[in-house]
Amino acid sequence: MKKFLSEVLRKFAVSIVSTILFAVVFFFLVGGIISSLMESPKPEVRASSFLVLDLTMNLTERPGGLTFEDVAEQALTEEVKPMQAHLLEVLDALRKAKNDPKIAGILVEGSFQPQDYGCGYSTIREMIDGLDEFKNSGKPVIGFCHSPSQLDYLVYSACDELYMDPSGTLLLNGLASQDLFLGDTLKKYGVGVQVVRTGRYKGAVEPFTSSGYSAENREQIQRLLELRWEDYLGFIAEHRDISADELNSSLVGNYLFEPEKALDSGLVDGVLSHDQMIDLIIERGALNHEGDWFEEVALIDYLDRPQPGEALKGPESHFQIPEIAVIYVEGVLVDGGVDDGSMVGGKQVVQRIRKAWNDGQCKAIVLRVNSPGGSVSGSDAILNEIKRARKEGVPVVVSMGAVAASGGYWIATDCDLLLAHEQTITGSIGVFGLLPNFEDLSSRFGASFDAVKTHPSADLLGVTRPKSEEEMRVLQTHVESLYQKFVNLVAKGRGLDAQTVQQHAEGRVWMGKDAHELGLVQELGGLYDAIDRAAELAGLKEPYEVIEMPEVSTPMDDFVEMLDGQAKVSLSPRLSILEKVAGLSALAEANDLLKSLDDPRRTYSWLSWYRGSFGFK
């Protein structure tokens, strides 16, 4: 017994000492991370520097930055997460560089790393508009590519000079849209799915009920891809001074370009090795102090981001002197408070809009939307708060990014002004209800459900049984009433009669240019245009301050929030290439799809087949 107690006490002592040592090591580690973050001032911009625009990033609408979670994940997995930059800060940096006498030019390199709803086509087009504005300074934009994707080449084609690595290739093989269909899978595993919907083109339910696209859905997706490809080739042809028709016809069977072939076709201006490219930039700029490189400043160091510790009050302690609030809605609209670039909660957006209009210093709101829609409940909550802001005398301008469809269009129906890019994907005026049940799946494992209820349909929205024909009729009527509400909102907001809107509805998706011609969008323009128009509506004169909600995250601020119990850290491992080949990425995509279905009434206005880089992934 004495020996037993001695052993227990020994192990207890070891556990205590181990815990103390772990705590000491942990706090030293965290202290080291924080110290390194606090002691990393931005490098000085020297004369004749080239601003390096490295495309190796996820270009988003909403501010993201580097969070404490990112730092921890990189430390644990040794995987470096691509930089996340958002459009407005990149445009501001390009405008600053245009007027900066120390910046001699811009070097474009790297390859986009799209994630979630980042790297949208129209978002990248707006970034290129910023490059074109920079060119007006007379400073050069020089590109150096190895094997750019088609999305990368959109930016490279706009460079004044474009050089390709001798070992690189350029693939221009057209656009495609691919979706995951779970209809047969759900049947196989005994998951029943019942659907109520409106509109011939409302194909959002197809991933859950079918094994492929319907004829109507295929028709509209094909049309969107053709319009995008036409715009893409037209843009390249204009900037590379070649014929769009000749380029398109030549790509039918001749779409892989090695460097010399790309040079002969006018797609690049020269073929240079990396060291030759460095020598060229040194000639255009200056040799650095070490004598081994050109004077440069990386985009991440040139962005006007808060330094760690500058915003310790929290990510939304705004409105001391700001006058225009840019509020971001990026990702699938859900019902709660999440906002991670993949999903955004109606509750979260409502809180930001309310914070804006309730502050006396905020004179106008720009709602920047990059969302394929989602929960009707979440969408309607945002719309009601927009109405409240306008009622309180704060003008609201909606600026559509890469996509603002279904619920993303719903929230734009009541505003002072609605702008979209020519290549924004919008419309999709329709509603559907998705009602899964697991009765068959459960029975296969010997499980069964039973219920005690006061009314035959008390468990109508549960997932334990299929719905009766009468219940489906009730739900169909509900969906049709929501659809009619959607149509009426559009008609009132856009000054159209309901019958006209009905002709453009039925879940049909439109490009921004077509939507503008149909009256579904009031003006064509980008984010800068929306901010300018908001200032006009509010009667503001320059200078005025623009603040963003949410703000850019910094690791230090996230860490302080975590200590306060406000932040949640969830380290989810990335899939390896082997796991992707094995099909786990498809399962992860299916899981994300199902997580988005959280509407309390199981009703959605959602463009489920849209992906962030539509056509290019």
Image (spheres, grey):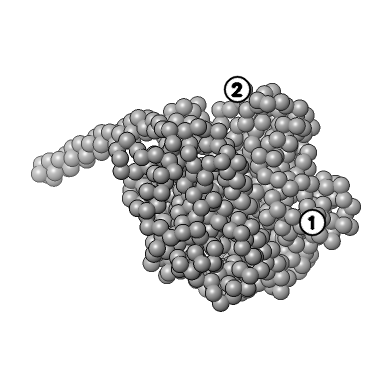
Q: Which of the 4 image quadrants contains residue 88? A: top right
Residue 553, how many percent across, how many down?
A: 49, 37
Q: Residues within 10 Å of mark 2 (few under 14, many from 20)?
A: few
Q: Is 1 situated left or right of 78 in this image?
A: left
| Residue drawn at point x = 66 percent, y = 68 percent | 245
| Residue drawn at point x = 68 percent, y = 53 percent | 424
- 45 up-or-down from 604: above or below: above
Q: Residues within 10 Å of mark 1 (few under 14, many from 20)?
A: many
- 432 up-or-down from 550: above or below: below
Q: Is 500 situated left or right of 233 in this image?
A: right
| Residue drawn at point x = 18 percent, y = 37 percent | 13
Q: Is residue 546 visible?
A: yes
**Residue at which label 1 appears:** 483
Q: Is residue 467 visible?
A: no
Q: Secondary structure at mark 2?
A: loop
Give the residue at the far bottom of this rendering: 253
- 509 up-or-down from 210: above or below: above
In this rendering, the label closer to the viewer, 2 or 1 = 2
Tell me the tag on residue 320.
2
Tell me the tag on residue 73.
none
Contact, mark 2 vs mark 1 (Cβ under 8 Å)? no
Q: Is 70 situated left or right of 13 in this image?
A: right
Mark 1 residue type? Tyr
**Along the viewing direction, whichever of 240 and 611 lies nearer the viewer:** 240
Q: CA distance from mark 2 to mark 1?
A: 41 Å
Which of the marked residues, 2 or 1, is nearer the chain's N terminus?
Answer: 2
Give the residue at the far left of this rendering: 3
Q: Secondary structure at mark 1?
A: helix
**Along the viewing direction, whichever of 457 and 44 lies nearer the viewer:** 44
